[in-house]
Amino acid sequence: MKKSRQPEVLPGTVGEGLKQRGVTRREFLKFCSALTVMLALPPAMASVMAEAISKARRQSVIWLSFQECTGCTESITRSHSPTLENLIFDLISLDYHHTLQAASGEAAEQARMQAMKDNEGNYLLIVDGSIPMGNPGYSCIAGISNHDMLVETAKGAAAIVAVGTCAAYGGIPKADPNPTGAVSVADIVKDKPIINVPGCPPIPVVMTGVLAHFLTFGGIPELDSLGRPKSFFGDTIHDRCYRRPFYDQGKFAETFDDEAARNGWCLFKLGCKGPVTYNACATTKWNDGTSFPIQSGHGCIGCSEPNFWDAGPLYQALSMPVSATGSLLGAAAIAGAAAGVAITWHNRSTKAAAKAAHEKVTVQELTREEK
Amino acid sequence: MNHLDLLTFARGSALNWALIIFAAGVVLRLFEILGLGRKADLAKPRLNSPGSGWRTIFTRTLPPEGMLKRDPVTYIGGYVFHFGLFIAMFFFAPHIEFFRSMTGLSWAGLPNALVDASVVAAIVALGVLLAHRLNNRVKRMLSGFGDYLAWAVTLLPLLTGYLAYHHLFVEYTLMLALHLFSVELLLVLLPFTKLFHTFSVFISRWYNGDIFGRKGVAS
């Protein structure tokens, strides 16, 4: 997709903006068709989506970053160009984003307040990073705690997108022992629709898909029980993995550099968490559809699942115990043996006591009793 | 608690406690049984009986003459169930990884399709055996709560494993956690129910074979 130099003032609708950037209708329809497929919508919806997005005013977006590593922003901004992923910036009016905005200090906060005021009830709030519930000083912006900023900004939002596992479920900051008391967006905001787009980082095209869905239908896509769009998080990595046939055949890599690994055999034994991880990595892939972690030879670490960091060792097969060892079994067996000796001693004592207490009865005594 | 947390708990603390109870329970029961002892047999052996106990371990695995025709459901159902369970337990690659982590030993697994077929066969066999138990007057009379409990806790791991593998009824991670919980229930109950025959069967077969050999009726 060709892009012309970005005009200083973008026009109101997405369609006008795209035209100004030299994006043809054909190219835009192709983009919408691809999104339609990814969102698991009927093919006919592509033209509906194109129509709706073209006419839509550029969606006002406020992006808040809390306890995070900026990986989520990096993921989206560093995606190859031109791709569906960076079209996200054509679809929205990014009114506030610490990392990307030029303004700083009071001017930056003013931009947020202005966007909130101008688009009351209509703006989309994107959050990356978890929120510390311990000392507010663990993470604050312009002297405002993350908690207060989230609550304040969420009030006038039409919907919230929690980008990345930290915002969606607490992520790595929440990992045991969770020193900052990190929580997710959904733990704090209860009265707004929240779309979780987890991943560490999340897949950029999922973000674009969610926004396109929002602009087309004016609502949020169908979500699973963990608040993730079903169209992207409906299947496990394992079920969509190109190495899956090897799992079914019982062919596994034993080390990261053995012949089996080079032949593309399954990485289950090396700790791949693909069987319990719901995400679209295996289908959408990364870096302009080049690859994804398993294709690069490393098992999935399950980064789009809640509390994945505390879900057992990363390099042990999913069927291995988290902490049990042979020594534990041995110790239990020794304890069992000790108890067994005690019981045997008790049983034998009972037997011996019964034998000692046994009184012999003579025939005469039995005869007397009968009389 | 989400499904992954539940699975982590099932793989973690729950499994640890189940394994502790299982290992301690099995050793305790073995001590208890073997510690009872037997009175010394002062009679002169009828035959030259050495090896009778060991032979019996194998001969009792086969049906006595005529019994297969008389009660095919019990024998064939028993074989199918036990072989199916054995294959599922010891030749499914993820299970082998579990044993490797606990013992350091590993061996080649079978393709999933074969393991899957074994599980289906074992589940069907368990169903047929239960129906037979309920329909056969003698078997029904001999059966008590312990028998039905043993049947149920043996079926559950097979069933939940099958449902998890095929992504049926509930989400995979949750079903995998339920599969582990069912295995843990089996581990906890095994030493204290009739399921303990897993460990005592060969001991009792050896003893029976040996003592009968001494009495002149070696099998």
Image: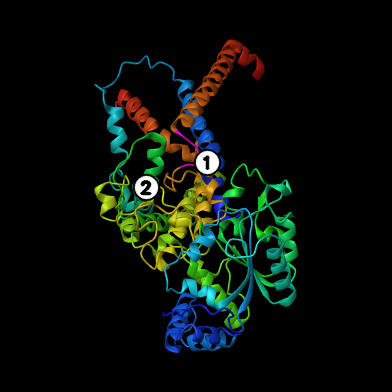
| Circle on res. A269 | 2
Q: How is the image coloured?
A: rainbow
Which residue occupies the foreground of this view, B58 or A62? A62
- Does any portion of residue B144 appear in the rendered image? no
Predominant secondary structure, magenta span: loop
Q: Which residue is at a point 72% across and 62% down the rendered structure image?
A: A106
Question: Judging from the image, what secondary structure is the residue with disc 2 in?
Answer: helix
| Circle on res. B15 | 1
Disc 1 from disc 2: Cα separation: 20 Å
Give the magenta-colored segment's residue range.
A321-325
What amino acid type is highlighted by mark number 2? Lys
The image shows residue B55 at horizontal and vertical percentages of: 27, 32
The image shows residue A208 at horizontal and vertical percentages of: 52, 73
Q: Is residue B27 above or below residue A289?
A: above
Chain assignment, label 2? A
- Residue B172, magenta (yes or no): no
